[in-house]
């Protein structure tokens, strides 16, 4: 008879841990929920939705079945409504750093915030990896991170009344520049070229404010900085004319977008091919490590197509593939949400009566 090791204090016991809170990770919650499996969801970002919300929240998606058009944010909002009956627990703003398989077949999982789990199964729905801010490539400037150099705005009040330099040409850079006009002492937008990736309306508004001397646009690249008494005082900017100028500042905001990185996943003993996780079969999308499944853009197999709808299909089969680990003595029957009273109860809806 195998002895049962007590769960250490402070460790969360789970049936399923999902790594990644993008659309496929959220739909994985739904498919597990239909099988009465509760999930914990971990994501390195501070909000759910993955790249759909981080990279194109307002851009339309046209290939979701039965939804002619929706934005990344709308898709995320609807998925959150769909999984609400299953009450998943989200652990956001933290990256999974440790995955260790135990002798009993379960896994020790730990995050960068120190959250620890003991789980029977793991679903990796990390898209193309964890998203991390693309940093400003100026030697030595990293010493000012989180004091004067920021890649994300958590507390807008921190920047009010300050002389700001905002780097970038996308929606985030333009949105924050426009937001701080009238609140900051001054706003300088720095972009490497005349063309912008932001919404045309935002670009037009920015240029109008520049004409009114409410803010300033500089075309060039940051190439250095000046500091005094351990504080960042000026950013050195080199223009297309080759001339380097100093731009005084109190705070520097950089929005160069997000860069996907495989990160610690590469150290978990999983088969990797071209920065993607190989799955053993398309029957259940299990990796070479029993109990760990990979769904969505993070996985690869012959014929793989990186589509959201493909990830949804993979999540459904992965849930059924994982069920025997969670319910080893239970036979899992395929049921339909249209007709199953049991699923209606799980979903919190009434069973329809047909004449």
Image: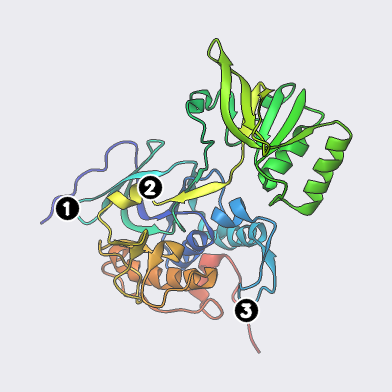
Q: Is residue 178 above or below residue 103?
A: above
* Nearer the camera: disc 3 or disc 1: 1
Q: In this view, does 231 lie above or below 79?
A: above
What residue is pinned by disc 3? 352
* Nearer the camera: disc 2 or disc 3: 2
Q: Distance between the residues labelled 2 and 3?
A: 47 Å
Residue at the image position 72 percent from the left and 42 percent from the top: 174
| Side of 184 where 294 appears, left or right | left
| Side of 283 where 221 appears, left or right | right
Q: How far apart are marks 2 and 1 (CA)?
A: 25 Å
> Which of the labelled discs sits on residue 43, or is there none?
none
Q: Is residue 154 visible?
A: no
What residue is pinned by disc 2? 263
| Side of 333 where 141 appears, left or right | right
Category of crowding for the residue at label 3, using alpha-carbon neighbours closer than 10 angstroms: few (below 14), some (14–19), many (at least 20): few
| Side of 65 where 299 appears, left or right | left
Residue at the image position 86 percent from the left and 31 percent from the top: 213
Residue at the image position 17 percent from the left and 52 percent from the top: 103
Which numbered disc flags the more N-terminal residue, 2 or 1?
A: 1
User: Can you name the residue that lies furthest to the top here?
Assistant: 229
Q: In this view, does 207 lie above or below 103?
A: above
Q: Can residue 20 be seen in this view?
A: yes
Quarter of image, res 293: bottom left
> Which of the labelled discs sits on residue 103, or is there none?
1
Indicate the quadrant containing the N terminus: top left, top right, bottom left or bottom right: bottom left
Indicate the quadrant containing the C terminus: top left, top right, bottom left or bottom right: bottom right
Which numbered disc flags the more N-terminal residue, 2 or 3?
A: 2
Which numbered disc flags the more N-terminal residue, 3 or 1?
A: 1
Category of crowding for the residue at label 2, using alpha-carbon neighbours closer than 10 angstroms: few (below 14), some (14–19), many (at least 20): some
């Amino acid at each position: 008879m195998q002895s049962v090791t007590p769960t250490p204090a402070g460790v969360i016991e789970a049936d399923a841990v999902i790594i990644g809170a993008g659309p496929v990770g959220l739909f994985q919650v739904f498919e597990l929920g239909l099988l009465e499996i509760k999930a914990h969801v971990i994501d390195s970002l501070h909000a759910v939705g993955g790249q759909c919300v981080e990279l194109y929240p307002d851009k339309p998606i046209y290939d979701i079945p039965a939804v002619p058009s929706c934005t990344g944010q709308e898709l995320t909002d609807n998925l959150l409504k769909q999984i609400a009956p299953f009450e998943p627990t989200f652990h956001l703003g933290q990256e999974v750093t440790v995955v260790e398989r135990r002798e009993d077949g379960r896994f020790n999982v730990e995050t960068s915030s120190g959250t620890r789990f003991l789980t029977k199964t793991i679903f990796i729905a990390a898209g193309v990896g964890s998203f991390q801010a693309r940093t400003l490539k100026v030697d030595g400037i990293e010493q000012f991170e989180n004091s004067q150099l920021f890649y994300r705005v958590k507390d807008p009040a921190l920047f009010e009344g300050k002389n700001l330099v905002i780097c970038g040409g996308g929606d985030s850079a333009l949105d924050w520049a426009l937001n701080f006009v009238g609140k900051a002492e001054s706003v300088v937008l720095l972009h490497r070229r005349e063309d912008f990736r932001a919404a045309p309306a935002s670009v037009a508004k920015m240029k109008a404010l520049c004409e009114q001397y409410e803010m300033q646009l500089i075309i060039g690249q940051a190439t250095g900085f000046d500091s005094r008494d351990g504080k960042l005082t000026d950013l050195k900017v080199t223009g297309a004319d080759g001339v380097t100028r100093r731009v005084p500042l109190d705070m520097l905001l950089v929005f160069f977008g997000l860069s996907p990185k495989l990160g610690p996943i590469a150290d978990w003993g999983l088969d990797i091919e071209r920065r993607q996780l190989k799955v053993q079969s398309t029957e259940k999308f299990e990796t070479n490590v029993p109990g760990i499944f990979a769904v969505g853009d993070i996985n690869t197999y012959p014929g793989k197509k990186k589509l959201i709808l493909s990830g949804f299909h993979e999540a459904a089969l992965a849930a059924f593939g994982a069920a025997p680990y969670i319910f080893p003595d239970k036979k899992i029957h395929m049921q339909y949400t249209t007709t199953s009273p049991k699923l209606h109860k799980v979903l919190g809806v009434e069973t329809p009566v047909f004449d």
